[in-house]
Amino acid sequence: MTIEATIERLSALGIHSILTQFTDLHGVAKGKLVPLQNLREWVATGAGFAGPSIWGTGLPRHGKRSEYYARVQLASLRPLPFMPGVAHAVCDGFAGGEALETCSRQLLRRQLARLSERGWTLWVGIEPEFFLLNKDEQGRWQGADPLDRLDKPSYDIKAIHRNSGFLEDMRQTLTELGFDLQQIDHEDACGQYEINYKFDDALAAADRYMLFKMTAHAIARKHGMTFSCMPKPLASAPGSGLHFHLSITDAQGRAIFTDASDALQLSASAYHFVAGLLMHADALAALCAPTVNSYKRLACSHSASGTTWSPVWKSYGDNNRTCLVRTVAGRIEWRLPDPSCNVYAAIAATLAAGLDGIERQLAPPAACDVDLYHLQATGSPMPPRLPRDLCAALEALESDTVLRAAVGESFCAEFIRLKYLEWDEYNTQITGWEHARYADGF
């Protein structure tokens, strides 16, 4: 559809403004409202922003590259049901008239271009897990539903009924936005939910997840709650993952990860891809689990529900949720990411690691056919573990020159710099646990 036809169509729907949305290095949606009538400018040049005011651009405070331009992707425009008169637009980052190397959406575009050279398409199904929270009288975060306190709350219908207002608003709004919903369920922690929708090509899947988060924040506020992407907000409960279901098709639409004759129904390319993920897993942890809190989720900790799905060991197995990579009928589930990640950067890095495995024909270890938590309890030798904290993950990313070069040195340098600052700030904090344990203990 042409720009003029788009303006006419949206104007007929009562749209007067565009929310030009891009994603900063931390994976947070940013943007501004601009007039619909100037759409041609927003597509050709972009909406302008002060570059250094945005996390992770690396742009200077003066000169032609000090301005960050968010260029509207015309096909992405759609009315926002929760912002009357406003259409949402996905934007790519530019500076000085060129694609910005530190823009995470441009990062993913570059990886997908590598795939396109082979005639391949990456399909990604994203599983958003999240918490609904509020604060108690002392200002502490807690589950928003005070009656949601079962020992094993997975699939709790009563909680779904109590929160049906939020869930129905989410269903209706996401449907209006074009999501093909598949299921809504209560997850394994009190206050935790998952809403699944159909997979898409990688770039569209990342765009859709950002729109999902924007919608969930707005609908939760309407119902007096906070939508939380914090990986592990409650110490005794399981955390939230953001699992990627990955498959690749060739130019003829054939699934390149599938081989029906194989015991796991995986092709040679799939095994190479898995080997790449495991080879680069430590560095990928920094980009897929990018916060201090992420490593509270990635821990062999006890869960109040009696079950933990934390993928802490670098292994893979057929329908094995205790592994970092779960294979299912010729599809790969990458279980490392959590919802605090920048979804564009996480998919880009995951693809880069898998392609490295394919290009170098790396071989993975033997598949794991046991429950790794049960194996750990016996004292048996275990597969290698992921980094135990953000600092170790950042050090792994620093030393993984192959992955950094493939993903993009400019982005990785900004990411590592900002995340070390985050780690240093965390290490200056004195927690309540420390006061309780040490204040009068010696």
Image (spheres, rainbow, N blue to C red):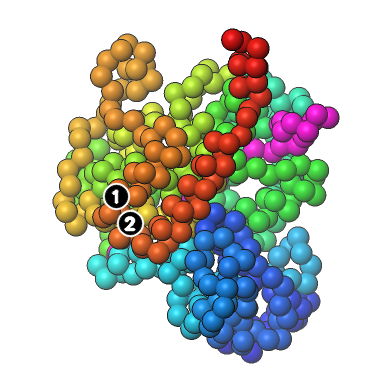
Instruction: Based on the picture, tell me whether residue 440 belongs to the magenta stretch.
Output: no
Q: Which residue is mark 2?
A: 404
Q: Which one is nearer the viewer's eye here, 261 or 96?
A: 96
Left or right? Give the position of 324 relative to 59.
left
Q: The magenta stretch spans which residues?
A: 119-144
Residue 382, image x, y percentages? 28, 23
Kindly identify which residue carries mark 1: 400
In x, y percent, where is residue 346?
43, 52
In the image, residue 377 sits, relative to residue 67, either above or below, namely above
Provide residue 238's location: percent of width, then percent of height: 55, 28
Q: Quadrant of residue 123?
A: bottom left
124 in magenta: yes
Q: How many marks?
A: 2
By secondary structure, the bulk of the magenta-drawn segment is best described as strand
Q: Which residue corresponds to the image point at 54% horizontal and 54% vertical from the top-left?
A: 26
Instruction: Give, as a three-letter code, the residue at label 1.
Output: Asp
